[in-house]
Image (cartoon, rainbow, N blue to C red):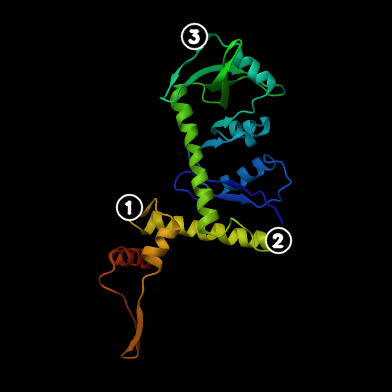
């Protein structure tokens, strides 16, 4: 079985992928990030205000420096190193405050990892996971950011919205045939992957530009069932081919509205 580990940049709005990199499974998750960001920025209009969100695969001084040099704010999940954990555990009790209704607490501090050029703001969440002889044992999750101002709770909530990427990945796998690649050749699988990405991008464009807002969150499975698979009859009349569609189809009006918008854009 041939494994793969694609690296993808998602634009949260409207959900397109401005850049992807199809890679073998044995590469480091964080390798090639800055090069991929270069490709993504090349297709984004200049002057667009950007915010970069990522999991800990991008917790790297080079990625941080890249974001700052390109005037991007960022929130990146931090690797919970021994040194970082020690910094967190030294925080006084009054540094923590309640966050949400799931028993979590939040604190913030400034910390400069070894090899980094300067200290950055860290926002950390802790949640009890048990007790030992010395008291409560916590599970920690931290993010690093160059947003030195702003409410830490709001920054954390905004960062957590990056988890929505998982829904897009699920859609790519279940809706566009990328859960299992069909070939033993890396390059053939790369072609298959790119076709899936192209189909996904065209679907996003269709929903954003040509369908009503109510379709925005529908999956490709729903679109296929409601719009793409309308049964019809192709007949000839007066030397013309005519496609007859059922008047009773519940989404026929949406179909024609979408068709009209596409034709107007050509």
Sequence-first disc among 2 and 1: 2
201 to the left or right of 32: left
Identify the residue shown where x is 34% and y is 91%: 239
Kind of element beneath mark 1: helix
Sequence-first disc among 2 and 3: 3
Q: Which residue is situated farthest in the bottom direction here?
A: 238
Quarter placement of the C terminus: bottom left
Identify the residue shown where x is 62% and y is 31%: 64
Kind of element beneath mark 2: helix
- Image coordinates of residue 235 in percent, x first then y, are 34, 86
- Image coordinates of residue 19 in percent, x first then y, are 59, 50
Quarter placement of the N terminus: bottom right
- Depth check: give the residue in front, 113 or 247: 247
Sequence-first disc among 3 and 1: 3
251 to the left or right of 184: left
Residue tagged 3: 94
Identify the residue shown where x is 59% and y is 47%: 8
In this rendering, is residue 3 above or below 184? above
Residue tagged 2: 187
- Depth check: give the residue in front, 5 or 265: 5
Query: Of tags 2 and 3, which is closer to the observer?
Result: 3
Query: Of tags 3 and 1, which is closer to the observer?
Result: 3
Q: Which residue is situated farthest in the left direction here?
A: 248
164 to the left or right of 19: left
Residue tagged 1: 214
- Image coordinates of residue 59 in percent, x first then y, are 64, 32
Dividing the picture into quadrants, the one containing residue 72 is: top right
Marks 3 and 1 in Cβ contact (< 8 Å): no
The disc at residue 249 is none
């Amino acid at each position: 079985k041939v494994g793969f580990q694609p690296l993808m940049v998602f634009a949260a709005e409207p959900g397109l992928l401005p850049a992807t990199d199809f890679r073998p499974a044995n590469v480091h998750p964080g390798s090639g990030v800055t090069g991929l960001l270069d490709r993504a920025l090349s297709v984004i209009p200049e002057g667009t205000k950007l915010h970069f969100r990522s999991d800990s695969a991008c917790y790297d001084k080079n990625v941080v420096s890249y974001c700052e040099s390109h005037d991007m704010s960022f929130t990146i999940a931090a690797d919970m190193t021994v040194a970082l954990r020690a910094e967190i555990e030294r925080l006084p009790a009054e540094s923590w405050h309640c966050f949400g209704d799931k028993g979590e607490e939040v604190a913030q501090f400034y910390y400069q990892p070894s090899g980094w050029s300067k200290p950055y703001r860290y926002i950390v969440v802790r949640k009890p996971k048990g007790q030992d002889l010395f008291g409560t044992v916590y599970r920690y999750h931290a993010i690093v950011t160059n947003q030195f101002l702003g409410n830490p709770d709001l920054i954390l909530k905004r960062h957590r919205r990056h988890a929505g990427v998982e829904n897009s990945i699920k859609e790519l796998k279940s809706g566009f045939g990328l859960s299992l690649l069909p070939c033993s050749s890396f390059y053939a699988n790369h072609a298959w992957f790119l076709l899936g990405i192209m189909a996904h991008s065209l679907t996003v464009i269709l929903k954003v530009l040509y369908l009503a807002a109510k379709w925005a969150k529908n999956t490709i499975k729903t679109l296929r069932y409601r719009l793409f698979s309308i049964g019809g009859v192709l007949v000839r009349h007066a030397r013309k081919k005519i496609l007859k569609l059922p008047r009773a189809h519940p989404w026929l009006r949406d179909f024609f509205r979408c068709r009209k918008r596409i034709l107007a854009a050509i």
